[in-house]
Amino acid sequence: MITKNFEQWLAEEVEETFGYTKEETTEGLESWLSDLSPVQLDNNVELMRKLLLQNIDSWNEDELKMMFIAPFLSAIQFNNYPHYKVFTQRLSKIESENVNSQGKIEWMIATGRQTPKKPFFFLHEYKPEKSSGNDPLGQLLIAMVYAQKQNQLEMPLYGCYVLGRLWFFVVLEGKKYSVSKAFDSTQKEDLQEIISILQKLKNYIHQYLGLS
């Protein structure tokens, strides 16, 4: 029996325990990151980018989350209740014959009002660049495993983990997953791509839910 918190999982352990394999790329990741619509940074987002550039070497985990990631994600406007909304710090559990694990999922987009029902996207976690602590990809993957098992989902799951200024996008399709290249959120062109990727995610959610 494996008993541990979500934050203790390594990506390799998730693969070995649940039978997942990492691919260089997958159809879902290729589709998500291709044909992105061009965007311009508005003044507010540009100010966030400059603040990040000035402070990325000194911020701790909470400062990175509160000063950049949270306001940046709010600017993308992922709350569209009653259709879907953002949930943060939600306690989740995986219980089976071989695994007993629980932990808080940092940030997710899902249907539901008071509790998340059907999840679409996970973001984990806000690690400073110089941290040598837990594996953010492992934590993201175990959250995705939870979602697959809890909701018996066959659709792809989308996610992202943040390591300081670097954003990595992840798609889980069945038992296979792939990870994007790093996008540097202190750089204008990369930040524009990050916004385009997140906006395309909103389009996927709307298509799935039949929203105009």
Image (cartoon, rainbow, N blue to C red):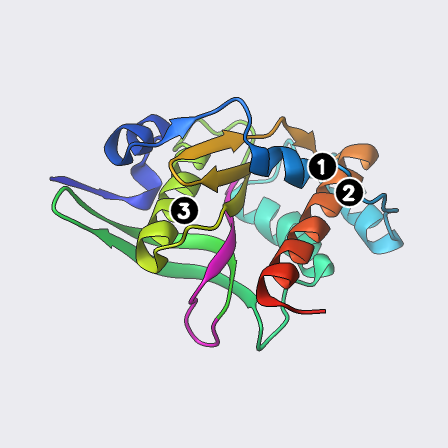
Give the Cα distance between marks 1 and 3.
24 Å
Residue 114: percent from left, percent from top: 44, 76
Q: Of the residues tagged 2 and 1, which is closer to the observer?
A: 1
Left or right: 126 in relation to 202: left
Q: State if disc 1 and disc 2 touch (CB < 8 Å).
A: yes
- 188 in the magenta segment: no
Please name whichever residue, 14 or 21, is drawn nearer the observer in this view of the structure: 21
What secondary structure is found at the residue carrying circle 3? helix
Residue 122: percent from left, percent from top: 50, 50
- Compare marks 2 and 1 and give the one earlier in the sequence: 2
Decide: is 61 above or below 181: below
Q: As shown in the figure, which amino acid type bears the numbered disc 3?
A: Met
User: Which portion, as a residue range, is magenta?
Assistant: 112-126
What secondary structure is found at the residue carrying circle 2? helix
Left or right: 94 in relation to 208: left
Dot 1 alpha-carbon crowd within 10 angstroms: few under 14, some 14 to 19, many 20 or more:
many
Give the Cα distance between marks 2 and 1.
7 Å
Q: Of the residues tagged 2 and 3, which is closer to the observer?
A: 3
Residue that badge 2 annotates: 49
Quarter the N terminus occupies: top left
Please name whichever residue, 166 or 99, is drawn nearer the observer in this view of the structure: 99
Left or right: 112 in relation to 56: left
Give the Cα distance between marks 2 and 3.
29 Å
Residue that badge 3 annotates: 144
Quarter the C terminus occupies: bottom right
What secondary structure is found at the residue carrying circle 1? loop
Q: State if disc 3 and disc 2 touch (CB < 8 Å).
A: no
Q: State if disc 3 and disc 1 touch (CB < 8 Å).
A: no
Dot 2 alpha-carbon crowd within 10 angstroms: few under 14, some 14 to 19, many 20 or more:
many
Q: As shown in the figure, which amino acid type bears the numbered disc 2?
A: Arg
Residue that badge 1 annotates: 185
